[in-house]
Amino acid sequence: MNSLVKSIIVLGGVSLQSVNAFTSISRSNVADISTTSLNVYGTPRKVQIIPSVLPADFGKLGADCKRLEEAGCDRVQFDVMDGNFVPNVTFGPETIRWCRKYTNMPFETQLMVSEKCTDAMLEEFVEVSKGPNGEPGVVIVHVEACTHLHRALGRIRAAGGSPSVALNPHTPAEMIENVLDLVDHVLVMTVNPGFGGQAYIPTMTEKIKKIRKWIVDRDLDVDIEVDGGIKATQETIGECAAAGANCFIAGSGLFAYDDLSEGVKELTDMALEAQGVAVGAK
Ligand code: DX5
């Protein structure tokens, strides 16, 4: 982003920190790699650590979002569950709207809800996921909950959001092959959705590799997110990063740290190492 734009934005009272955070949603997330011995197929993409709010204190969710921002997280994921698509219930758009008052961090909303809820409320979720200045927020719909997935992704983009599609562990990658050109992110669930603290499913690694190959071979600017059981270990974040994922959702794996910024650093370093990118070159 050229200096003129930055100075205009700074004059407009937006901190550079939030500018950088939102540009990470723009369509050039290739890592600034200095010295590398690349493990990943294609050029590694920018490592992003994205906490899930599921383990947070729902009584002070806004304050916990602020803590995550101060710990250096790239954005925060709101797990919307309706007790229908998944056997658990969390919150709706109003809770996300309130959290915006506490932080400038980019938001990501994962809609683990029935088709009826998606159809009725999609634009509202796009709206509350936006940044403090209307920047696009990431909105994730599940392929298993959308008969008209192509249309739903188009609605997110048209409403000013950043579209993303999620796949449950049993769902083959081929289910999203024909909408890869519509999304900025693909979310590969590495646990069955509905709860935090579950074990990572290692058979998801091949699915990540397959989607990564499609993205690189078709020269698409798409991030791969993984969610579920992600910890600062070779077997989880390491495996996913080497397979081509670059956005890492962490719930219990991050909230286990007393010092959240230490957790963000350990997760980031492990992912960079697995990508073969020099640690610190985030
Ligand atoms: C589960 C959610 C995940 C979950 C991750 O349905 O989508 O985001 O909170 O939690 P951990 O990292 O503890 O598996």
Image (cartoon, helix red, strand yellow):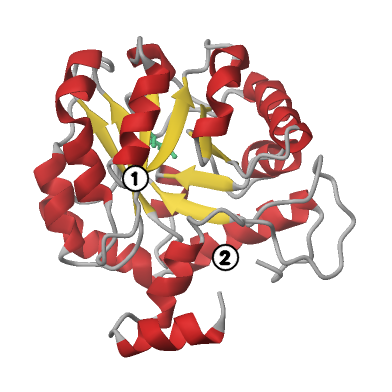
Query: What secondary structure is marked by label 1?
Result: loop
**Residue type at the position of mark 1:** Gly
Horizontal side of residue 236 vs 155, given as left or right: right
Horizontal side of residue 70 vs 132, given as left or right: right
Query: Mark 2 vs mark 1: which is more N-terminal?
Result: 1
Instruction: Say the numbered circle drawn on residue 265.
Output: 2
Residue 69 against residue 182 in the figure, above or below: below
Instruction: Say the numbered circle drawn on residue 161.
Output: 1
Instruction: Say the numbered circle drawn on residue 246.
Output: none
Residue at point 33% right, 59% down?
Answer: 135
**Residue type at the position of mark 2:** Lys
Residue 172 placement (x, y as % from top left): 59, 11
Residue 258 placement (x, y as % from top left): 39, 63
Quadrant housing residue 8: bottom left
Question: Relative to the observer, which residue lies in front, 65 or 177?
Answer: 177
Quadrant housing residue 29: bottom right
Horizontal side of residue 127 vs 148, given as left or right: left
Residue at point 51% right, 67% down?
Answer: 262
Question: Relative to the observer, which residue lies in front, 23 or 53?
Answer: 23
Residue at point 16% right, 39% down?
Answer: 124
Query: What secondary structure is marked by label 2?
Result: helix
